[in-house]
Amino acid sequence: MTQKEGSGRLAAMEAAHYPQSLPAAPAGWALGLCLLLILTGCASTARPVPTAPATRSNDVLMRAIGLVGTPYRYGGNTPVSGFDCSGLVDFVFRDAAGLSLPRSTRELIDLPAPRIDRDDLQSGDLLFFSPDGGRISHIGIYVGEGRFVHAPSQGGTVRLDRLDNPYWRKAYREAKRVLR
């Protein structure tokens, strides 16, 4: 066998083994592949999407914590002007949850919202205090793990305090849940 015959034979074997074009795919193969991928995706286990109240309460706690350090100002209700306690609550709930609440602590205590036991507090619950032992005159936002954000006093700033602090434990009166 000559070299020319050998290379011709090799080319014929390669052509038979490695065709230049693929056979035509059955009709609808792309549609079938897409359907398979969609059904596979439907069968997979996904993490649950948080409910609207859980998302809103998280937004409220993050916004409230983000305002820590803002100056106290009686009658204040913006980060620029400063906050008093009810102005802080009004701003945070309006900005983070799109919820318009009454402006004064007296009006907030009368909200038709469920009262919550201290042991069942969740982020976003409103906390009411009576620091002088008389009528309720202070409000804060519970942010979890026994802590709350509030605008406590003239000359101070918005701050994060612990509910089990002896002063606040004694002044605590009740809590309400406005995010449902």
Image (cartoon, rainbow, N blue to C red):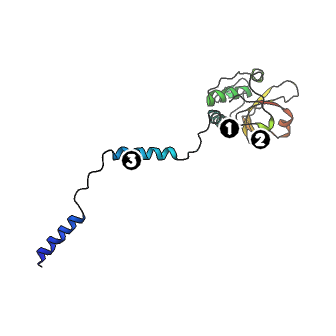
- Quadrant hosting residue 46: top right
Q: Which residue sits at x=83%, y=40%?
A: 165
Image position of 167 (left or right of 94): right
Q: Residues within 10 Å of mark 1 (few under 14, many from 20)?
A: some
Q: Secondary structure beneath disc 3?
A: helix
At 22% from the left and 59% from the top, the residue drawn is 20
Q: Which mark is residue 87?
A: none
Decide which of tag 1 and tag 2 comes sooner along the chain: 1
Residue linked to disc 3 = 33
Q: Nearer the viewer, residue 55 or 81?
A: 55
Q: Residue furthest bottom?
A: 1
Q: Are marks 3 and 2 in contact (CB under 8 Å)?
A: no
Q: Which residue is identified by label 1?
A: 65
Q: Is residue 147 left or right of residue 7?
A: right
- Asked if disc 3 and disc 1 are in contact, CB closer than 8 Å, the reply is no
Q: Residues within 10 Å of mark 2 (few under 14, many from 20)?
A: some
Q: Amino acid at mark 3?
A: Leu
Badge 2 is on which residue? 146
Three-letter code, disc 2: Gly
Report the Cα–Cα distance between label 3 and label 1.
49 Å
